[in-house]
Amino acid sequence: MSLSPHNIMEMTRIGHYDILDCIGRGGMGLVYLARDTRLDRQVAIKCLRTELFEPHYRERFKREALLLAKLNHPNIVQIYDFIETPDQLALVMEYVDGQNLQARLREHLVPMAQRMTWLTQIAQGLAVAHDSGIIHRDLKAENILINQRNTAKISDLGIAKSQDFNATITDHVAGSYASMSPEQAMGEALDFKSDLFSFGILAYQMLCGAHPFGDTANKLQLMQRIISHPPVPPTKHNPTLPPEVCDLLGQLLSKNVDNRPDNTHWVASQFEKLSQLVISAPEWSNDTEMTPQQASLSQLRRHPTNDTHATFDTRHLEKPALHSNSLAEFIRQQKRNIIVGVVFISVLISFSIWLLQPAPPKYVAVIQPSMTANGMHESQQALVKAAIYDAIQQSMVQLDGYYLIPRTEVTDTDSTAVHRATAADELVTTDIQCQVEACAITLTRLVPSGTEADSRLVAKDIKRLDVLTNRYTSVMKAVQDNIGLLYSTKLTSTLDAASEQEYQSFINTGLTYRDSGATPELLNTLDELPSEIKRNPIVTALYKDIALDLYYETGTSLYLEKLDTRVRQQSSMDNLGLYNLFYLEVAKGNLAQATGIIQKLEGLTNNDSAMYELHAYSAMANNDYQKAISYYEASLSIRKTANNLYNIANAYRYYGNNDLAKSYAEQALTLSPKLHQANSLLGFIALLNGNIDHAIVSFEKAVKQNPSDISNLTHLGLSNLLKPDYAEARKMFIAALKISPDNPTILLNQADAENLQGNMGESKRLYEKIISIAESRQKDETTLRNLAQSYAHLNRFSEALNALQQLEKADSQNIETFYTAALVHTLAENTRSAIFNIEKSLTNGLNSVWFRVSWFDPLCNESSFQALMEKHGEPDRCALQNF
């Protein structure tokens, strides 16, 4: 069988490799996705066109294939094998599931921290190749692959040359004209410094969004500029680029080979240092609002930097005024020398400050304790576990240099699973063995044995203690003392002022909230605690969680007012106190104040990932979903966790990109199969897409994982409503209302179920109740949506249209807004507006199954509605009049 690329359609097997697909083509030939039948793994096979090469190339190719196969580095695509036949040469290599760097930068908003990390990785891989005498000769964005783990890998080293080979411009693999070095363009002998020049072009493009020698489609003109013109200063495209970066780019892009760095490892180390500088400085990382076509560092610094590196074309720089006499010229020259000296000292001071900055915190996950008890009632067991778990949590927030991963992200009791889901640097596990009221507690501090994500966890330290459970305050203090010993630090008891009864009340309130959800009674319990206890930020944090849950579920402003009073009475405004204040301000809609609080936190902590998440949370509250996505992606570039993946998925869901939302949610579940929010999101996407059976499966998983989450119950009910299974839908709505009585959204769903079943009296009563509840609440998007639909079902169209108008102003791009508008206009017999909004709903991803319900039957008289239904998969919609 011939391996010629011309036989692509007939090719099914090469040696012991089964061909699965053709995944790329170019001037060098074709690239296939194949399966290695011996090792049962996917590989990529590049079939090279032999007619492109001189006769001597075949033996050289074989020798270099053997050399390349010895390169084993995480940032180089691994070569596994080569295949030789009379008319073909082929390389068998690692298959990278991802996309090339050029496509990634074009299609995604990539934060500067991630760009710098990729440049560091590329340089590290290039250094290893150079150590082996291999130069790439075609280093460009298209030849860098980004895998699913966001790791950069250099590809096409298989068409590189050993540096002892004097290549000429006549070689067909001379490289791409836009990434050539001057010596390469002139056909001179090359060494590894040619790659450094190409790498400089790549780095310049990634950091400035332009080619250093100008963007032109004229190949000869660009090559001439590379040979004889100085590069445009990066500050022309990006006036705020740090001088350290400009200097490094200047060295890489020097036309004089001797002025380029002498060691690629040194280049990699410089990018690594600068990468850490970008990551560690929040004002240098707030650049994620870039369009995919822009790669500016415009947010890195508030003030522009003049770049006077000798490499760059000074015509683009601001020139000083001319002087007419020699004395003035002398003064000007001396002044310039002084300025250069000041700039150097400033850079030195900045670098010193960077070195002295605190390291990013270590992330710690506290796993729920495991417990075995004899002679102890189940309710007491739960209380003992809660007291010990809470004491550990209170201890961890006191440790300098550590960040406690929120308990909501720790969804498993298996330490390996938690490590995989949270990317924790350390984990704390607890084993409790009790006999009646005496308990033996083992506290274990676990750390990964290596730097890999799947490294085995090993015990760094273990502490054992015995306690009596007749006094929970004693248990708290003993546990906190031993956590202090575990981390070699002295900890204070955060609630030592609480009496035994008060501490039990606090612990029991938290336990009940996490088991059964928020209730007004729980808030009242915390309100009854003494002032000194209530003002503790730890108690306030629990109060905040309960109050905000009640506020978001009911819309009652009273809960915000109570929380406002409590937060402002906190005994201290440390990190935890500021977090409490941040979430309060976001709930109140005071986003400018919330941003100010983030800035205060940035001054107290070096936790960029957490700060990005706060910025994203605020953006979501402001319905700025694209900005939220940018911040979540910046956080993800630092820590790939199930929670970060879910957050991005949720933001994409609100942004209207359900395909990306689904992809990120599935990745989140890969890391954490028990993450009920991700299952819920997949169910919601399936619901929007009309995959009712899939939606029910996902929501049933979410309900099983978290039975007290009213959102899961509500959406499961809604899925059954559309199935239609009204009895099951009603059962879910009632279960949700037991957790959150008088919740307007759940009441609306139940009213709709009664309406569709023909129980018009009961549906009328429920719609009126929703309106009555809304009168005393803040008119946010959810309230306006409920009001608009309820008014419309009661034929109060003037009020319905008024609520709809406010909703469209407040949340214009939400798909649920389009659907609400379609329903209101249909019921109000505004046919043209109804069909317009139906089309917007369908165009933005809502499935046509949502328009099967009988409320839209009158539109069947309109040919445009019938056409829309047929176009979107419901050609028989208007025959379904009895649904």
Image: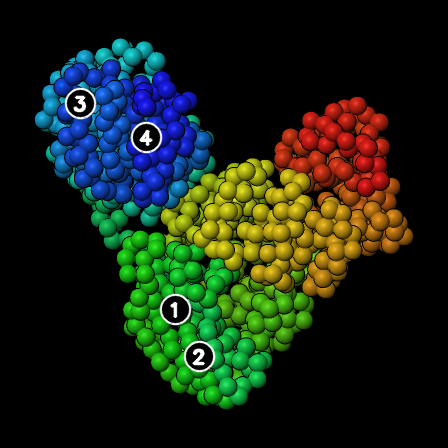
Q: Secondary structure at mark 1?
A: strand
Which mark, by number, is residue 58?
Answer: 3
Q: CA distance from mark 2 to mark 1?
A: 13 Å
What colouring method underlies this structural image? rainbow
Residue named by callout 2 = 432
Q: Residue furthest front?
A: 1
Viewer can see residue 286: yes
Amino acid type, callout 3: Arg
Between residue 251 and residue 879, name the one nearer to us.
879
Q: Nearer the viewer, mark 3 or mark 1?
A: 3
Q: CA distance from mark 4 to mark 2?
A: 59 Å
Crowd tier of the residue under label 4, counting other residues whose Cα lies within 10 Å: few below 14, some 14–19, many 20 or above: some
Residue named by callout 1 = 428
Which mark, by number, is residue 214?
Answer: none
In-image side of 136 versus 791 (left or right): left
Q: Earlier in the sequence, mark 3 or mark 4?
A: 4
Q: Secondary structure at mark 4?
A: strand
Crowd tier of the residue under label 1, counting other residues whose Cα lies within 10 Å: few below 14, some 14–19, many 20 or above: many
Q: Earlier in the sequence, mark 4 or mark 1?
A: 4
Between residue 880 and residue 22, name the one nearer to us.
22
Q: CA distance from mark 4 to mark 1?
A: 51 Å
Residue named by callout 4 = 14
Q: Position of residue 493 (x, y in %)?
A: 42, 77
Amino acid type, callout 1: Val
Q: Are marks 2 and 1 in contact (CB under 8 Å)?
A: no
Q: Secondary structure at mark 2?
A: strand
In-image side of 722 versus 525 (left or right): right
Amino acid type, callout 2: Ile
